[in-house]
Amino acid sequence: MSFFDSPLRFKIDEVLNALFNIKNETVNAKDDSCYMIVDSSYALPADGKTDPTHGLELTNEKRLEKYFEQRYEFHKTKAQSVTNGIYADKTLEKFFARFAAKVAEKTIGFLVWSGSGWSHLRGHAPKLNWIRYAQSKCNGYRLERGSI
């Protein structure tokens, strides 16, 4: 049985990568399973017009896996050739900006596992009671306000 509040292991930078790519993606207007990531595996004609073979053909699962890896550059939109992806309509802009700002805040850095450990905990350990799942495999935590 699974619970939605179960701790999950993730790297916050990968989540930012995926959000960035989702909000900026463009797709081939003639085949929406071809994502228009700037890539050396294909070249667009000088006039920018596409045919169904242009772009990277990815399943939804492969697309998301790729989007977590790094931030990609996408080809610009062009009428009847390259269109915006589902969320590339600027609806995620404000959310992404706020999320990125929160991740960049030094004051909350201790809440996120960086891969090298809870590096921001030095000097704060007595004030925090950490709930761990599978020894450092999650970002689960509990703050005890009484000792802060």
Image (spheres, grey):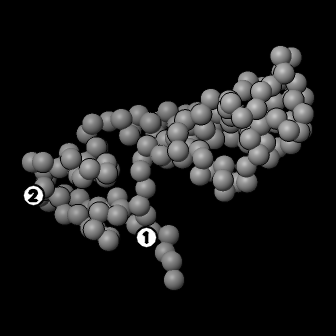
Q: Tell me the element at label 1.
A: loop
Residue depicted at 49% across the width and 33% down the height? 97
Mark linked to residue 126: 2
Mark linked to residue 6: 1
Depth check, front residue: 30 or 3 = 30
Q: Is residue 52 above or below residue 8?
A: above
Q: Indicate the position of residue 64 as horizontal and vertical percent values.
A: 62, 51
Q: Tell me the element at label 2.
A: helix
Residue depicted at 49% across the width and 47% down the height? 15
Depth check, front residue: 57 or 32 = 57
Residue 115 visible to the viewer: yes
Q: Is residue 45 left or right of residue 19?
A: right
Q: Is residue 45 above or below residue 51?
A: above
Q: Indicate the position of residue 49 as horizontal and vertical percent values.
A: 88, 24
Q: Indicate the position of residue 120 as horizontal and vertical percent values.
A: 20, 45
Depth check, front residue: 113 or 4 = 113
- CA gap between label 2 and label 1 equals 25 Å
Indicate the amino acid at tag 2: Pro
Q: Indicate the position of residue 142 as horizontal and vertical percent values.
A: 26, 62
Residue 84 visible to the viewer: no
Depth check, front residue: 109 or 64 = 64
Residue depicted at 29% across the width and 43% down the height? 108
Q: Quadrant of residue 75?
A: top right
Indicate the amino acid at tag 1: Ser
Q: Is residue 63 left or right of residue 144?
A: right
